[in-house]
Image (cartoon, coloured by chain):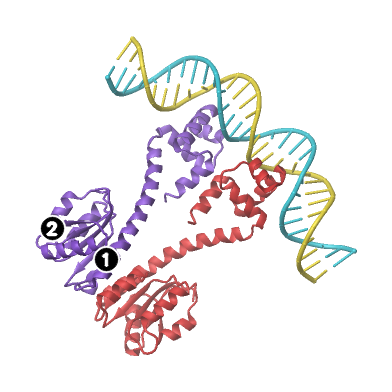
Chain colours: A red, B purple, C yellow, D cyan
Amino acid sequence: MTQACAHIIDDDEAIRDALQWLFKTRGVATRLWPSAEAFLEAWQTDWPGCIVLDIRMDGMSGLECFEALLTRGNRLPVIFVTGHGDVPMAVAALKKGAYHFIEKPFNDNDLVDLVEQAIAHDDENRQAAADRGTVEARLATLTAREREVMDLILEGKFNKVIADELAISMRTVEAHRSRVFDKMKVRSAVELAQMLTALR
Amino acid sequence: MTQACAHIIDDDEAIRDALQWLFKTRGVATRLWPSAEAFLEAWQTDWPGCIVLDIRMDGMSGLECFEALLTRGNRLPVIFVTGHGDVPMAVAALKKGAYHFIEKPFNDNDLVDLVEQAIAHDDENRQAAADRGTVEARLATLTAREREVMDLILEGKFNKVIADELAISMRTVEAHRSRVFDKMKVRSAVELAQMLTALR
DNA sequence: GTCGCTATTGTGGAATACCGCAAGATCGCC
DNA sequence: GGCGATCTTGCGGTATTCCACAATAGCGAC
């Protein structure tokens, strides 16, 4: 399941099948889920694509499912679909980060367009997250001392000052500094600063 | 008008007055506008606060007013108020950056809370923008040559390399470099990198 | 033409950064 | 006890940065 796909969560089998067919004809991969519970149980953080989520379902509602995903750190764009929504509900959902909120009956093309946009949006997010990930992976290889030295480097301090603050010799600071650059795969403090500031 | 206030745009005088009174009792400054046109004519980029915008009005509608503000670079949070809104309209407004979308009749306290949140939100935006502004103001004082040198510094290159690339002496590069640091009010290339990367 | 800004370069020296080589000490793990 | 990772330090030398002082030249504004 490394292929981006639209996760369709709806307790109405007829609708699931209809949507599957619709997306298939437009070249969008889908995966069908008969309930929020089933999806949440299987869901993995790293799934790419988007979610098409019906609000009114037996058992856990779409909104509850959305909340659950939020607390679990979901990053997939969520498109709400509902036949009985209202403005406050839509506003609340969007302000909490939902990607879209569409009412039934909807135009097939509109939904496919939305899903394609959502998947593209997710791709970008994922790329940015991957970049952050590699940087964080490098950070993770630093020892505690190296990280300490790095922080002081990022404050623009001279090795001499860093040595004073940590009460160690300048030569030791140089050693740490050199290893920090190696591990972070940068050649200068400037690159390091850019790499880390970009994370924020 | 440097005081943050809620701009109430509604063509119904009774509603304007009612809202003015409501906000006054809650200590929120207001300014009343009888039409979108009147507001747009007076509007200044740097006004702080937020906008409470009725959708259905004689003349220019609230949505049209919103679009006009968007193209003019408005940063004020916009709270839409309407008695005849629907879900697609609310979704479209929020996705374009509106702060909220509330239906009449609304709870007075809810609206005041929203407005207060919006004003607080604008404060934060404004602070961040001010920071960007000061940095950009400093950038503006750089000469073309200094900016060129700065860009190469930010690529982590040595003065020697920069001198080669620009076909000037190392000493000249040092002079530019020194002036760049002065004008940008930083003491090291690391600070410079952080300051500029934070802009993105 | 004079004034101010900018770009340019030089000299010379002090402060820093950077590097390879070598090595002692501590600590946790098998 | 041996092994590996980490933190620590020193020596000696080269590369770079940073700075004060000084100076020439072009260019646009008044």
Q: CA distance from mark 2 to mark 1?
A: 21 Å
Q: How many marks?
A: 2
Q: Which one is closest to the eye, mark 2 or mark 1? A: 1
Residue B16: x %, y % from top left: 15, 62
User: Label 2, on which residue?
Assistant: B35
Corner quadrant of residue B110: bottom left
The kind of residue on which mark 1 rests is: Val
Q: Nearer the viewer, residue B34 or D2?
A: B34
In the depicted structure, whether residue B114 falls above or below residue D17? below
Residue A39: x %, y % from top left: 44, 82
The kind of residue on which mark 2 rests is: Ser
Mark 2 secondary-structure assignment: loop
In the depicted structure, whether residue A47 falls above or below residue B150? below
Residue A30 in view: no
Residue B54: x %, y % from top left: 17, 64
Which residue does the image show at 32% across and 63% down from the upper left? B117
Corner quadrant of residue A34: bottom left
Find residue B112 and name its label.
1
Which residue does the image show at 64% across and 42% down from the upper left? A161
To which chain does the residue with label 1 belong? Answer: B
Residue B80: x %, y % from top left: 22, 65
Corner quadrant of residue C19: top right
Question: Which of pointers 2 and 1 lies earlier in the amino acid sequence?
Answer: 2
Mark 1 secondary-structure assignment: helix
Q: Is residue B104 left or right of residue C10?
A: left
In the depicted structure, whether residue B5 falls above or below residue A23? above
Residue A154 in view: yes
To which chain does the residue with label 2 belong? Answer: B
Which residue does the image show at 51% across and 49% down from the upper left? A194
Q: Is residue B166 left or right of residue B76?
A: right
Farthest front residue in view? B25
* Label pair 2/1, CB-CB below 8 angstroms: no
